[in-house]
């Protein structure tokens, strides 16, 4: 049993009635149960009328103990990139599609959430990746991702050239549509669709998955998460991009280097006590049930 939570923050993108209903239900019932409830400011604006305290996302640290994200994995990713530095516990209620990160059933949200708030939960730490773009030896932009960092062209289906170094060791050069550098969290996202391996969350590892490489010998590779990955782009490339979780996009000029390393802070992800990662995989990916 863990430490109970007393101050609960609610976050969600109110893009349909079901999400609104869940947020309003949680606000009403948690306040009635004498918990201190905070609603993130953009969420509160979309909801309209709220009773709870309203604070912006970057001010939740110090004012809340548990952050409840109502929505899909995209909502969780956006919150996680900010909340990881605050060391706040985060739990998700799935109002999206797959829901690898948001695992509470919205139809039983309150019944599943209350035991968690009372201290009955599992907690795991998920690491993020930082991407730093270097131009002529100087840092120009920095981004972070909990799923993946992707090097790609700014054109559709356009081949690029780059070299990959790991801890200053040359690994390979490649002509392809790009490269996906994924965390275990992201191994069931874009990396999976590109043929990458599934990495269980406890692994301290990252995967490098080529995107449509121009050679049959190119394969994904899994390396320690303590490694520093450097991508050196060819000087005759067109304009490239780095995408962080498909959200933040940063320009990469021909000849730029990209440094990818583990972010120093981790996301504290909370689950109900009966959570099973393998059950999530089985349900989301349609794997077969037991035969006996």
Image (tube, rainbow, N blue to C red):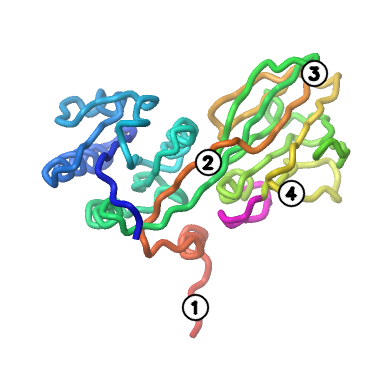
Mark 2 crowd level (few <14, some 14–19, many ≥20, 10 Å Cα) = many
4 or 1: mark nearer the eye: 4
Q: What residue did someone put label 4 on?
A: 223
Identify the main secondary structure in magenta. Answer: loop
Image quadrant for the N terminus?
A: bottom left
Tags 4 and 1 in contact by the CB under 8 Å rule? no
Which one is earlier in the sequence, the residue at label 3 or at label 2?
Answer: 3
Query: What secondary structure is marked by label 1?
Result: loop
Q: Name the residue under label 1.
A: 290
Residue at 50%, 82% in the rendered image: 291
Residue picked out by circle 2: 266
Which circle's residue, 3 or 4, is located before the other in the chain? Answer: 4
Camera-nearest residue between 168 and 192: 168
Residue 124 appears in view: yes
Query: How many other residues sit within 10 Å of disc 4, few (<14), some (14-19) or many (≥20)?
Result: some
Q: In this view, does 204 lie to the left or right of 105?
A: right
Which residue appears at 33% of the width and 24% of the height? 56
Q: Which mark sits nearer the N-terminus, 2 or 4?
A: 4
């Amino acid at each position: 049993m863990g430490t109970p939570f007393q101050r609960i923050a609610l976050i969600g993108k109110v893009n349909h009635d079901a999400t609104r209903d869940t947020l309003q239900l949680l606000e009403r019932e948690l306040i009635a149960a004498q918990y201190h409830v905070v609603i993130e400011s953009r969420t509160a604006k979309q909801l309209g009328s709220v009773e709870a305290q309203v604070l912006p996302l970057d001010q939740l640290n110090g004012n809340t103990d548990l952050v409840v994200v109502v929505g899909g994995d995209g909502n969780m990713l956006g919150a996680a990139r900010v909340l990881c530095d605050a060391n706040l516990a985060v739990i998700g209620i799935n109002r999206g599609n797959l829901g690898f990160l948001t695992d509470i059933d919205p139809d039983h949200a309150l019944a599943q959430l209350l035991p968690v708030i009372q201290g009955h939960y599992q907690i795991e730490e998920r690491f993020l990746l930082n991407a730093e773009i270097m131009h002529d030896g100087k840092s120009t932009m920095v981004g972070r991702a909990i799923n993946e960092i992707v090097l790609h062209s700014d054109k559709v289906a356009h081949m690029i050239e780059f070299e990959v170094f790991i801890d200053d060791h040359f690994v390979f050069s490649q002509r392809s549509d790009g490269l996906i550098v994924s965390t275990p969290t992201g191994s069931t996202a874009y990396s999976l669709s590109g043929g990458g391996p599934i990495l269980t969350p406890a692994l301290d590892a990252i995967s490098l998955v080529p995107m449509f490489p121009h050679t049959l010998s190119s394969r994904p590779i899994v390396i320690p998460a303590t490694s520093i990955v450097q991508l050196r782009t060819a000087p005759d490339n067109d304009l490239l991009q780095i995408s962080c979780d498909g959200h933040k996009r940063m320009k990469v000029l021909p000849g730029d280097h990209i440094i990818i390393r583990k972010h120093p802070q981790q996301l504290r992800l909370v689950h109900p006590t009966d959570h099973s990662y393998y059950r999530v995989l089985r349900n989301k990916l349609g794997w077969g049930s037991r035969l006996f």
